[in-house]
Amino acid sequence: MSGSPRKKGLWVQFLALLMVLVTVLPLAGCLDNHADLKKGFMQNMEVKSCRSSGTFSVVNNISTEQLNPQAQKLFSVLEKGLALETAMQSATSMKMVLVPADAEACNLLGWDYPQAPAFDFYVDEGKIALQTSADARCLVIDPAETGLAAPEADFDFSAVFGTDYLQGQTDKAYAFAKALIKDFDFPLSRVESLGTETLQLPDGTVTTRKIKVNLDFEEILALITYTAEYLSESEAFKDYVLFSVREPLEKMVAEGALPPEEMPSPEEIEKLAETNYQQLQSSLSEAVAYLRGVSPALLKKQFGLDLSATEEYYLDQAGFIRKTISTYQLKAEHEMLKSILGTPQLDLTVNSEQILWDINKPVEVVFPAADEQVSLFALMADPDLRAEIGEGPLSLFVNLLASLNAAAVSAARANLVIDLENNLCLLNGEAVDLAPAPYKEGETLMVPFRALAELAGGEIQWMPENKQACYQDERVEMKFASGSKKAYVNGVEKELTVAAVVRDGRLMIPAWLAGEMGQYFATVENSIVFVF
């Protein structure tokens, strides 16, 4: 049993989480004497339907002459700004329309169509649709149609990624978001109450209370650290991640969607869910360790980095946040920027503004009709169907996805499955012998370091004087020693459950550590999958 079913549902998982975080991210912490702001975020979490509109712009403060032509064109669009209109019928049904303010500037970026640029984004019970003003049809991503891209799978994905799954995803994500807001107690030094202000909104005149929050670089860095640490310890976040992995697998078993020999037991499902959560938690812990080890002074010295932020919130008498104004200052200086911008310097002012109205009033969202749709999964399975999408911007998007998919397939040099129960190793589907053979030390699967490192394609070093091994490629650097329970991955210390050991003249390491060298790693009971 591999980890692939989890991947098929990842976009749903991230969509649900994104929908929540769009609401939560502006929360910058509240002092006790500003509990009404915290209450405002909780109130906004209770919004079932609404309309909103906003603007977004990025002002480049570097002389235009220093930028390369492509950067000049990009900032000419961003500085004029983008407008976003949203109609939310429910947490799982909405439409968003993005319109650049400067159509001519978009022409310079490659918008070579007679229609003025506009981008539509629909969500409806797990389906996503994309369309631009220059496309006759929309591109639909429907998890129930996943099988179109893999007809050999021969089972109904709608039974797995149906409405119940999306609703469960959304409920768990909202539960996590509410816990985050409720527990959030990061102390800020500059929170101001600026009295009342009258807003003219589409649903009438509203009297609001204005609250302003200012953050400097030190507070922003501390806030990011606080949030990463909270996520790594949050039971609500853990429940959300475990549900995301466990639910589709349990549905596959219930529907008989897998061959009997591949049916995971409840214990296997639980272990896979826990393993995936532990991998995510490990990444968060690594981020926390890094953030704790740096300072604004160090980042300014290394990258010329400087950040500051201002958030303004307008709360109505019912406690809803009806308007938000955000301003961010970002500076950086590094040679790597030169290849992107034409100058090593970056100095940006990011502005956004959003208003909210028709709160909890009926809002209708009409998803594109069937004859206006083209399935992404069908297109990926049958390139001949790409003519149905036409020659608009979506055709370029589909071609890009196809090329990225082809690049990913070619980049994966090896797919290795180790099945201890049947004493079998399959490399790209062919039986192979690994030397020494993998074995279990307690609950830890041990695998030969050199054999897997060669599959990963990186540089290997062995220092016999201290029995230390090193692996390095463009993505990861690892160091560990025989007999030691410590390993270092990209400079972060890892504690091994079982020490690396030399066996039959070869270094054996825990399988999860070998997984750090690959693009993908999953394990269930006596089977393990590596993609290098």
Image (spheres, rainbow, N blue to C red):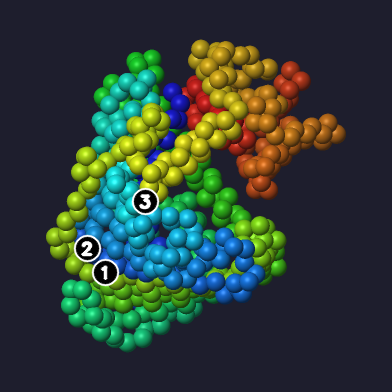
Q: Residue at x 61, y 74 (%)?
A: 63
- Label 2 sits on what residue type? Cys
Element marked by disc 1? strand
Residue ranking furthest to the left: 362
- Looking at the image, residue 21 sits to the left or right of residue 284; the answer is left
Residue 90 screen position, x and y as percent: 21, 54
Asked if 461 appears above or below 102 in the picture, the reply is: above
Residue, disc 2: 50
* Nearest to N terminus: mark 3 or mark 2: 3
* Nearest to N terminus: mark 3 or mark 1: 3
Q: Quadrant of residue 346?
A: bottom right
Residue, disc 3: 17
Residue 277 screen position, x and y as percent: 45, 41
Instruction: Estimate how packed mark 2 is, as few (under 14), some (14 to 19) or many (20 or more) residues with alpha carbons within 10 Å.
Output: many
Quadrant including the N terminus:
top left
Residue, disc 1: 356
- Looking at the image, residue 67 sits to the left or right of residue 170; the answer is right
Residue ranking furthest to the front: 114
Tags 1 and 2 touching, CB below 8 Å? yes
